[in-house]
Amino acid sequence: MKAIRFEGAGRPLNMETVPDPEPGPGWVVVDIEAAGLCHSDLHIMSGMDLGDLTVQTPLTLGHEGAGIISSVGEGVRDFVVGDRVGIALVTHPVEDALFAPGVGHDGAFAERELAHVSTLVRIPDNVTFAEAAVATDSVATAFHAVRTAGSVRRGRTVGVIGLGGLGLNGVRIAALLGATVYGVDINPATFGPAQDAGATACFQDVRRLAAQRPDVIVDFAGVASTVAAAVESVRPGGCVVLVGLGGAVAEISIAAMVMRNVRLVGSLGASKDELREVYELIASGALKPAVQEVPFAELPAAMDRLARGEVRGRLYTRPRAHLRVPAEVA
């Protein structure tokens, strides 16, 4: 089969022919119908230190995958050939990282992918493969950060920093939970989509949030300046949830943290149960991820676009569809 492979930090992605996967006990093969492109893939490609998550190369990247089970290994009882499934990026607990697609083992930038049965979530009939794929991280991560890590609920005021793919989902989820939401991004072109998702107003400067006295600020950018400003702009006794990995180190005011009783919480990924809840929201029509398709052969170039900050919403590709027909038709 064809796969787009990562050979090591600083090296380009290349399409290669690799052996078809064979499922061992507790594993299945999923024919990939959609795979999302994520900034975390860029972090892996740059060689960023991911802490407890160890990435061995060569590797097929892609941790946002969805498709149809085509083969099952010994001992698999709850899933059968033909099931439509999303492959969860399980990070709770962290020891499950060996099962994380595109991190602990070969991922979704391929025609087929091995998936451990513990990571599989059935896709509702009225959820598309593209929606199901990007939901495994882009939506589920935002859901966990807002609802679980940030404890957002009706009546809360929430600031969302970074209005890209995750941030827009964060805005929508916070609004669905009944919060008043304000967005922040250096690019004002993101303000319209954010307000369509439920933001009351948007700003280019994080410190503009201070006047709104937010109970929670969720930082999907994660650069030094946004983290520091968020700690100083959340209301006394409030919470800052850090999701983005845009920078390596941030200098935070200890006085602001202590004297204002601010909590700073890191948030990574989501649980399988949270992914199920996200699929239910998408199936109901309450949540609609913004997605844009790119041809599989153009995936490396699309990753470059993502790195340059030229993407709004979430890019995805369809490996099997694009390899079955000429690129100009796909």
Image: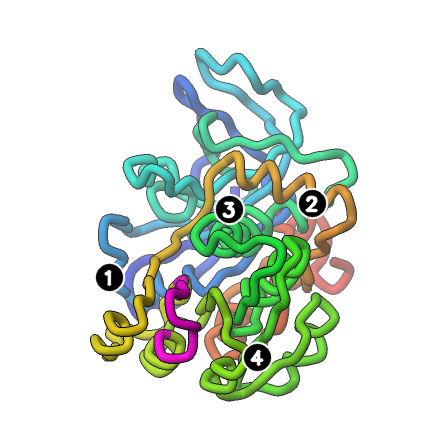
Q: How far apart, in angstroms, are the residues tagged by discs 1 and 2?
A: 33 Å
What type is the residue that disc 2 sits on? Leu
Secondary structure at badge 2 equals helix
Foreground: disc 1 or disc 2: 2
Q: How far apart, in angstroms, are the residues tagged by discs 4 and 1?
A: 25 Å
Badge 3: how crowded within 10 Å, few (<14), some, or many (20+)? many
What type is the residue that disc 1 sits on? Asp
Which residue occupies the foreground of this view, 165 or 181? 181
Residue 261 image offset from top left, x and y in percent: 30, 67
Return the residue at label 4. 310
Residue 108 disc label: 3
In this orientation, does residue 169 appear? yes
Residue 274 in the figure: left or right of residue 84: left
Q: Marks 3 and 4: in contact by CB < 8 Å?
A: no
Q: How far apart, in angstroms, are the residues tagged by discs 2 and 4?
A: 28 Å
Residue 281 disc label: 2
Residue for point 58% across, 75% down:
183
What type is the residue that disc 4 sits on? Glu
Q: How many numbered marks have been drawn onto this rendered protein structure?
A: 4
Q: Which residues are magenta?
A: 231-241
